[in-house]
Amino acid sequence: MSARTQKHTRNQTRSLASAAKPKNAAPLHPAIARVSNLIRRRDYQAAAELLRSAGRDPLVRNTLGVCLLRLGHVEEALAVFRQFVLTPGSVTERADVSNACKRNFAMALLMKGSPSGALDVITETREPGHPMAVRIREAVKSWEKSLSWLRRIDWKLNRIEPPRCQVPIDFEPGEFEFEFETDTVQRQFDKPSDNSLELAV
């Protein structure tokens, strides 16, 4: 391999690692750097396969959970979030887990058919104005309107959900804890390029 090719390969690797950055500006976990391009392409299946064996770091587990939600694998996503959002052996959320992870846990509960659980978790985050919290509450309100009057009263008064409850959502579920900086990172592996464009997921 020539020196020029080696330099280009190193540049590609650095560019891929910088494709996503955590929102708190902390160093990005290596596993997230590896899957950031897959997530940008919305290849959540491939990303999830890599993340399942990438360790127990909350950032990694949250990213895995979001990928699973977007794939429709709600049961597995819910299990992932429970493992690190809740205190072991209890139903209490851990204080050291970010609100983003808790909102994703709420999203998993909602998609599983537990709007009451989702609302409880959202309330605990104490960020009622966050866009994802607003979307979850609005989805529940729309679902309420679809209930029969008897079911609606039962829900309003007792927080009892009907059997096989399903709350429709009209938005992409889950939120990642990192932001992307370059556009279509996969192009870096197609041809050399020094250009970088803004992108958002």
Image (cartoon, grey):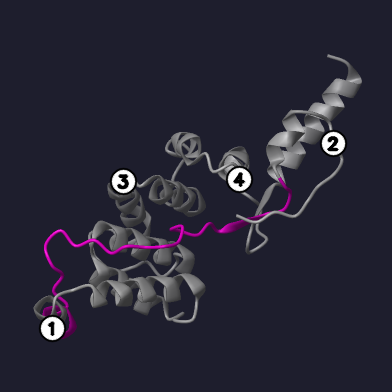
Callout 1–callout 4 Cβ contact below 8 Å: no
Nearer the observer: mark 3 or 4; the answer is 4
Give percent across and percent down for residue 156: 18, 83
Report the Cα–Cα distance between label 3 and label 4.
22 Å
Q: Look at the numbered disc 4 and give the secondary structure of its residue.
A: helix
Amino acid type shown at disc 1: Ile
Query: Does the magenta segment cover residue 143?
Result: no
Report the magenta residues as a range: 154-183
Which disc, if any, is residue 76?
A: 3
Nearer the observer: mark 1 or 3; the answer is 1
Q: Quadrant of the N terminus?
A: top right
Main structural element of the magenta stretch: helix, strand or loop? loop
- Earlier in the chain: of badge 4 and badge 2, it is 4
- Earlier in the chain: of badge 1 and badge 4, it is 4
Vertical side of 115 occupied by 157: above or below: below
Q: Look at the numbered disc 3 and give the secondary structure of its residue.
A: helix
Q: Is disc 4 surrounded by few (<14), some (14 to 19) or many (20+) residues within 10 Å?
A: many
- Earlier in the chain: of badge 1 and badge 3, it is 3
Give percent across and percent down for residue 76: 31, 46
From the viewer's perspective, is 112 left or right of 192? left
Amino acid type shown at disc 3: Glu
Vertical side of 5 occupied by 135: above or below: below
Q: Name the residue carrying label 2.
A: 193
Report the Cα–Cα distance between label 1 and label 2.
60 Å
Which disc, if any, is residue 40?
A: 4
Amino acid type shown at disc 2: Ser
Q: Name the residue carrying label 1.
A: 153
